[in-house]
Amino acid sequence: MLGLCFHTKKLSGRVKISGSKNAALPILAATLLTDEKCVIRNVPDLEDVRITFALLRKMGKRIKFENNTVEVKGRLRNGALPEKLVRKLRASVLVMGPVLSRLGEGSFALPGGCALGERPIDIHLKGLKAMGASYSVLRGRMLFRNQRLKGAHIKLSFPSVGATENLLMAASCASGVSLIENAAVEPEIIDLCRFLKAMGASIKSAGSSYTVSGSPVLGGADFTVMPDRIEAGTFILAAAAVGGKVRIDGAEPDHLKALIKKLKASGVKINEKANSLIIIPPKITKPINIITGPYPEFPTDLQPLWAVYMLRAAGVSRIKDKIFPARFMYVDELKRLGAAMALKNAVLVINKSILSGTNLRACDLRAASAMIIAGLMADGQTRVYELRHLFRGYENFFGKLRKLGANVSMEKVKK
Ligand code: UD1
């Protein structure tokens, strides 16, 4: 599939935000902590979610998915994570915590690198080892010896989102109390904690620490996933970059404070309501620098979209990514559109640019949405290839953009 984008003068209207991908994935992994039925609502219909279903099925679960509600039933039988699924979905490492705390043993294919750069899992493994897990590596797999996990005092070397989630799940069914310090506090992790508590887990959080009292097994739960703050940020930045008044419904403004602050500094008017935001872009955009960091700092996932927005700013702006310092693979593609961007010592320098449409190749999920929005700003026609990256993480992206008046469509790639 490829995306066809034509120059669009302005966006207008309303867009409804779907459930959060990055909350749904760990919550689905957490269903492995019980053999009782779980019902999870507001689950976005996306490729990454469907891969997670395949993974859960491999481990013994039965899945029914209808109207964004998933029912997960069945006993956790198998603790082996196949390489094919790990390669398709990095977040599949999130089943390690639940599997080891339930079964005591497991075998997981080692994850490889990805388009965002090196993606180690040393912080996950150090935490699991502190809880008593031990493993050896054989033919690309980690083989964990049978060992009941026990509560531990763990201080993360960096507040990794995935490691925090893995360890919270592992600690929920370990024996005894765990204290996890210097942990991540992203809203998706708070949503996972709410789900774990609904299953009967005992978790207390204070600042960047979590105290978890383990119980041998958790119960089923009925839960609704939080709105996707990255999808909301994507449509906010689409409105700011292309222009036009847009209303974002179903978003949680509290989760978007860092973005809203920077947008306001650039001149965007934002009308915040309890569950919606109205975005009114300025006539002249001021250049604003961003540095990404762990929540509540500016999210790395919105960095490529901020770069596209800054192409209309009257002056020079800069981006530094503290989370994924090499997350600038999209820059050479945007340059093909005429974007005046350059990387200097891992800092992206952006100048005001007039864009003209051409063929682009998406390299990862957020780069894909950034390129499509850049395509709407460019004169003429832009073709974005490798759309599979987009389907991993956005529900009905083209339908939602079209509803806002964007001139976009999808086409099959001719062989
Ligand atoms: C999650 C999000 C992703 C987001 C990222 C940062 C999901 C499914 N994905 O990814 O969209 O961009 O948070 O907000 O929720 N690191 C290590 N060792 C580890 C783990 C991480 O060095 O064991 C490093 C990573 O290479 C990276 C940084 O820590 O440089 C942040 O990674 P992490 O917070 O773990 O991100 P993910 O959970 O993979």
Image (cartoon, rainbow, N blue to C red):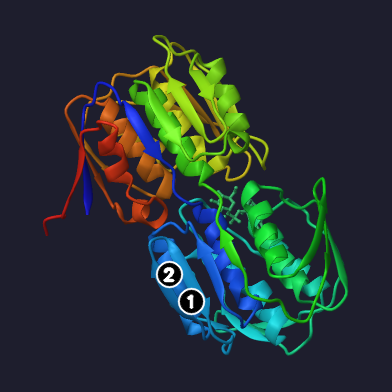
Which of the 4 image quarters holds residue 324? top right
Does dot 1 land on a helix, a strand or a loop? Answer: helix
Is residue 232 in view?
Answer: yes
Which of the 4 image quarters holds residue 332? top left
Picture mark count = 2
Is residue 111 in view?
Answer: no
| Left or right, residue 188 beside residue 15 | right
Question: Do labels 2 and 1 touch, CB within 8 Å?
Answer: yes
**Residue extending farthest left:** 414
Q: Is residue 259 above or below residue 184?
A: above
Q: Position of residue 288 (x, y in %)?
A: 54, 19
- Looking at the rendering, in which quadrant would you find the C terminus? bottom left
Which of the 4 image quarters holds residue 389? bottom left
The residue under label 1 is: 55
Q: Which residue corresponds to the image point at 73% horizontal and 72% vertical from the top-left?
A: 170
Q: Which residue corresponds to the image point at 58% horizontal and 66% vertical from the top-left?
A: 222
> Can you tell me whether the CB of the residue at mark 1 lies under 8 Å from the nearest atom of ligand 1?
no
Q: Position of residue 37 (x, y in %)?
A: 57, 78
- Kind of residue sitting beneath label 1: Leu
Query: Label 2 to label 1, Cα distance in Å?
Result: 6 Å
- Kind of residue sitting beneath label 2: Ile
Residue nearer the viewer, 5 or 399: 399
| Left or right, residue 298 beside residue 395 | right
The residue under label 2 is: 51
Q: Position of residue 234 (x, y in %)?
A: 44, 37
- Looking at the rendering, in which quadrant would you find the N terminus? bottom left
